[in-house]
Image: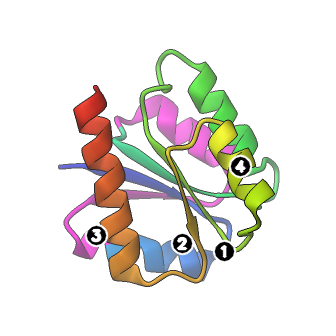
Amino acid sequence: MTSILVVEDERDIRELIGYTLRFAGYDVVLAADGPEALGIVASKHLDLIVLDVRMPKMTGYEVCRLLKESPDTKHIPVVFLSAKGQGSEIEQGLASGAEGYILKPFVPDELTDQLRQVLAQATVTT
């Protein structure tokens, strides 16, 4: 089963995304911040990471850069999920190594479809 880590500091949004992805058939792991996410990544096989940009302790950009710098995790696709949709924010997210950038608010079915596309692309390129 495909495993997705959702990193989001707002509990209600984190749980909504988790529910949406579980309903779509994914194994979902939830984290509230960057350090918690990095701990999970070190101990669990993951196929995709959905990462909020603005979080306490570490930004999503920082987490993404650390993941992409590590030989053990650089292959895991990262998709940012953020309310910040200015061009510079999206460029910064993609420049940090992310494979996608989804804006909040999101429609659950569209979120699932976009993540499926990223997973399919990751399968093609690996």
Q: Please name the residue shown 40% across and 46% down the image.
A: 48
Residue farthest to the front, as pictured: 87
Q: Which amino acid does label 1 sit on?
A: Glu
Q: Name the residue under label 4.
A: 91
Q: Which of marks 4 and 3 is nearer the N terminus?
A: 3
- The answer to whether marks 3 and 1 mark residues whose Cβ atoms lie closer than 8 Å is no
Q: Within the magenta stretch, is there residue 25?
A: yes
Q: What residue type is labelled 2?
A: Arg
Badge 2 element: helix
- Residue span colored magenta: 21-45
What's the colour scheme?
Answer: rainbow
Quadrant that contains the C terminus: top left
Q: Give the distance between the C-alpha atoms of the residues marked 4 and 3, in whole angstroms.
A: 30 Å
Q: Give the distance between the C-alpha atoms of the residues marked 4 and 1, in whole angstroms.
A: 23 Å
Q: Give the distance between the C-alpha atoms of the residues marked 3 and 1, in whole angstroms.
A: 18 Å
Q: Give the distance between the C-alpha atoms of the residues marked 3 and 2, in whole angstroms.
A: 12 Å
Query: How many numbered dots are placed on residues in this image?
Result: 4
- The answer to whether marks 4 and 2 mark residues whose Cβ atoms lie closer than 8 Å is no
* Image coords of residue 78 (percent x, y): 50, 45
Q: Which of marks 4 and 1 is nearer the N terminus?
A: 1
Q: Name the residue under label 1.
A: 10
Q: Mark 2 points at which residue?
A: 14
Q: Give the distance between the C-alpha atoms of the residues marked 4 and 2, in whole angstroms.
A: 24 Å
- The answer to whether marks 2 and 1 mark residues whose Cβ atoms lie closer than 8 Å is yes
Q: Please name the residue shown 28% across and 58% down the image.
A: 116
Q: From where the camera sits, is residue 16 visible?
A: yes
Q: What residue type is labelled 4?
A: Glu
Q: From where the camera sits, is residue 19 visible?
A: no
Q: Which of marks 4 and 2 is nearer the N terminus?
A: 2
Badge 1 element: loop
- Return the residue nearer the eye: 34 or 108: 108
